[in-house]
Image (cartoon, grey):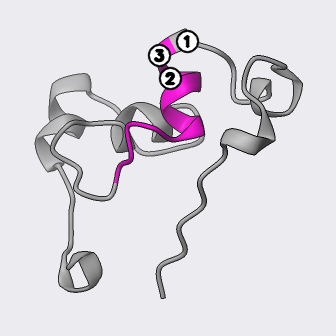
């Protein structure tokens, strides 16, 4: 179960000499080692295509019918 898992990768920050912000968040959370990341998600499509985040709204290739939303509480 993912409910009791924590995930972080401090080496990522050192390797890329970056901090987590709106420009680095997608690259940080799209890592293979992240158990919460879904390779079939809209984020993955945007990351693979190297699209700007605004493309989520504009990109017609990524239809809302393919969206998969998972809520963790």
Query: Disc number at residue 40?
Result: none
**Closer to the camera in the image, 31 or 68:** 68
**Closer to the camera in the image, 11 or 49:** 49
- Dot 3 lies on which element? helix
Residue found at x 35% / y 49%:
37
Task: Tell me whether circle 3 and circle 2 mark residues in contact (CB < 8 Å).
Answer: yes
Task: Tell me whether circle 1 and circle 2 mark residues in contact (CB < 8 Å).
Answer: yes
| Apparent side of residue 61 relative to residue 48 in the rendered image (left or right) | right
Residue found at x 34% / y 32%:
18
| Apparent side of residue 47 relative to residue 15 in the rendered image (left or right) | right
- Dot 1 lies on which element? loop
Q: Which residues are magenta?
A: 37-48
* Residue lying furthest left: 11
Query: Disc number at residue 48?
Result: 3
Query: Disc number at residue 50?
Result: 1
Task: Tell me whether circle 1 and circle 3 mark residues in contact (CB < 8 Å).
Answer: yes
| Apparent side of residue 8 relative to residue 66 in the rendered image (left or right) | left
Residue found at x 40% / y 31%:
27
**Residue bearing the label numbered 2:** 47
**Residue 13 x %, y %:** 24, 38
Separation of disc 3 and disc 2 at Cα? 4 Å
**Residue 5 x %, y %:** 19, 76
Q: Up-down: is 69 above or below 28? A: below
- Mark 3: few/some/many CA within 10 Å (<14, 14-19, 20+): few
Q: Up-down: is 70 above or below 52? A: below
Residue found at x 88% / y 24%:
58
């Amino acid at each position: 179960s993912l409910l009791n898992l924590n995930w972080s990768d401090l080496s990522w920050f050192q390797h890329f000499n970056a901090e987590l912000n709106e420009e680095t968040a997608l690259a940080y959370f799209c890592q293979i080692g992240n158990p919460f990341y879904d390779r079939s998600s809209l984020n993955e499509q945007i990351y693979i295509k190297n699209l700007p985040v605004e493309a989520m709204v504009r990109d017609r290739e990524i239809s809302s019918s393919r969206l998969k939303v998972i809520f963790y509480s």
